[in-house]
Structures are given as C-alpha cells and as structure tokens.
Amino acid sequence: MSHNSSGSNDPAVCGPHAPPGPAAGSNTPPPATPPWPPAAYNSSRLRHETRRHHNSTRAALARATAAAALPPAEGGMKVSVVSRSGREVVRGGVELKDSAKVADLQEAIYAKTRKYYPARQRLTLPLQPGKSGKPVVLNAKSSLSEYCEKGSGSLTVVFKDLGPQVFYSTLFFFEYLGPLIIYPMFYYLPVYKYFGYEGERVIHPFQTYAMYYWCFHYFKRIMETFFVHRFSHATSPLSNVFRNCAYYWTFGAYIAYYCNHPLYTPVSDLQMKIGFGFGVICQIANFYCHILLRNLRSPSGNGGYQIPRGFLFNIVTCANYTTEIYQWIGFNIATQTVAGCIFLFVAASIMTNWALGKHRRLKKLFDGKDGRPKYPRRWVILPPFL
C-alpha cells in the first residue's frame, strides 16, 4: 500500500493541529478545543482515505499505461513494469525488440534491478477497470507481442516479487535427508539414556526391519528427486524449505523414538511379515508410477497436463499417491505405533487434497468438447473408497 509522503497538513495524515489563538490584546478567552477527531469525522475520513487510495492506485496504473503507449524506438517495444499499487518497478520502463519473449523481459528487469532474478518474478497483465477475476500470468516462453494490442508496440505488466527461491531438487533433498539421518540415530545411538532410561536395551528383529524399510523409502525418494522427477516449475520459495523440513524431520524423530524404544513390544511375526511385505510391494509400485509420470514430460519439464495411462493409472487418477499411502499402511501394520498412525493420517489428508484438485483439473481440461479427449471415469486416490 502506498503512503502519503507529500507533507500534507491534513489532520488525518499529520495529526491534530491546535486552533489559532485569540488576537493580541484581546480579552476573549480562546475557544474550547473539541475532542479530536470526532467519531463522525473518523468514519467519513476513513471512507475518504480508502477511496483516495484506490483512485491513486488506478491513476498510477493509468499513467504507467500511458507511458507505455508512447511510441517506442523503431523496431522495438516499450514495456512499463509496475507493482500492484501502481509504483514503477523499473523507472522509465524497458525497451526490447519486437521479437522478445517474456523471458527476455525478466532478464532485463533483473539487469536493471540487480535483485529480482527471473525465478522470483511473477508478471501479469493489469486487470481492466470494472473487471474482476484472476489476472493473466505471462508465460516465460511466450512472445511479448502475444500480450500486446495489435499495432500498439507497448505493454504494461504488473510485477510481483515471489521472494527468494530454491530449486525443487534442493527442497526435496533437504526435506528427505532429515528422516534418513534422524531415524538411524535412534536405532544406533544410546539416545534413550538422555530420556531417563538406564536399563539395557535389546534390539528386536522388527526394529531392524523397520529401520531398513524407513531408510530405503527416503533413500529412494532422494534418488527419484535427482534421476526420475521432472518438475513443471524449476524453483520453490525458500520458506518452503523450513516448512517442509519441520514436517518431515519432526515426524521422523517422533516415529523413530517410539519404534526404537527399549520398552516397545513388537507385533507378531505374521503381522510384521504381512505389513512389511505389503509395504515393499507398494514402494516398488510407487517407483513405477513415478516412471510413468516422468514419461509424460519432456526433459525440460514441459508437456502440460496429460491423461496419465498405464498400470494403476488406468483405474486411479493419482496412483502415485495411492501407492504412497498404502505403503505407509503396510509400515503401520508392521509397527503399530500411535506416532506412525498420526503421520499416516496427516500425510493421507494432504495427498487426498492434492489428488482431488488434480482430478478436478483433468476433468475440466479433458471435457470431450472441441476435439479434446474426455477424461475417463476413475477412482481419485483411494479405491474402493474415493
């Protein structure tokens, strides 16, 4: 939000001012100063300031648009870059060739600001007055001329700073590295003496299998991050690293503490074999689902939305989430801890929300109209329930 810095004497901006005193030599007492500001004045002034702010924002965008409308250099294009409040992000705008792409504009913004590198930029077209809805986001691979009015040679874009970014591979590596290291610490190291347990610890075969199962899962995830996954977006906000690491690392320590505890009573051998056997099958199936999803995208990460086919995708929209959830069901059958069940519930809730969103998008994109294929009838994530 822009702030008034013009040095106005408006009391609403600069504070109350005392009324002028009586004339020199006058015996007339000064008028009593009423309480300031009156309640009615506050309400009307607030409405006035709100209208003034919206009007100033619209006026700033209009000025930027008018500046962009100035004739650019011959064979070039003039782009004005403004914030959502209408403030110029790049003074004087940016001049580019007619053939320039959005990615060229992002590089030019970075060259002029030396702060906003392309990955942290979000460029949109300004909303037209009186219209509502989401603004059009500029595609980095598209030509700028696609967003210009015919013959204008000028453009105004609205800039948003997405904040510091990291590669998705970096994000996934650190969030998976924590559980891979933390769990074995509870298995190998004498950590329980720091929690007040002084007795001799006996490691059950179940605890060894659980540790191997856990480490295999997160080692597999790290390998998939670098050698299997192809990301549609190259980067993620840096803040997601701290959020995701807090989630995975905390649950890793929480589950490891109870699974490796000296007082833990293991389940029966049959239950353990059923749980781990089912879980390993689901882990292998999950890996194959990731291979199928990888083949839907080009090495650059392009490809857009496509209908996933083959294997479990023929009956389930998000078979990768299905196998992920079922492998943790297998782990909990074999370990049977409250901590593991809580983790399963939270993870299944998150993935179900993602799956419902993806299912809706695919059904909307592939509606069977205008030559588009119709999305087939499938389970969303958890057959036979959802």
Image (cartoon, rainbow, N blue to C red):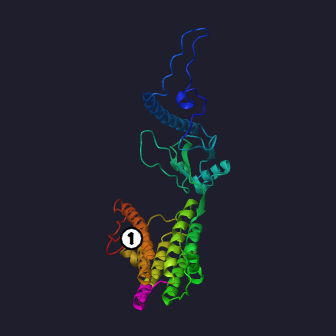
Q: Is 56 displayed left or right of 275 in the figure?
A: right
Residue 241 location (% of width, % of height): 57, 64
Is residue 75 visible in this depiction of the protein?
Answer: no
Q: Nearer the viewer, residue 197 or 380?
A: 197
**Which residue was labeled with disc 1?**
317
Q: Nearer the viewer, residue 25 or 273?
A: 25
Q: Quick one: label 1, few (<14), some, or many (20+) residues within 10 Å?
A: many
Residue 357 location (% of width, % of height): 40, 63
Is residue 293 visible in this depiction of the protein?
Answer: yes
Query: Is residue 276 part of the magenta span, yes or no?
Result: yes
Amino acid at pointer 1: Thr
Residue 212 location (% of width, % of height): 53, 84
Q: Main secondary structure of the magenta part?
A: helix
Give the quarter of the image for residue 352: bottom left
Q: Which quarter of the image is occupied by the C terminus?
A: bottom left
Residue appearing at x 61%, y 10% in the figure: 24
Q: Is residue 69 above or below residue 334?
A: above
Q: Is residue 212 above or below residue 242?
A: below
Q: Which residues are magenta?
A: 263-277
Query: Is residue 302 part of the magenta span, yes or no?
Result: no
Q: Nearer the viewer, residue 61 or 175?
A: 175
Q: Is 167 displayed left or right of 385 in the figure?
A: right
Q: Secondary structure at mark 1?
A: loop
Q: Which quarter of the image is occupied by the N terminus?
A: top right
Residue appearing at x 61%, y 55% in the figure: 118
Residue appearing at x 44%, y 64% in the figure: 305
Residue 263 location (% of width, % of height): 48, 83
Q: Is residue 41 above or below residue 355?
A: above
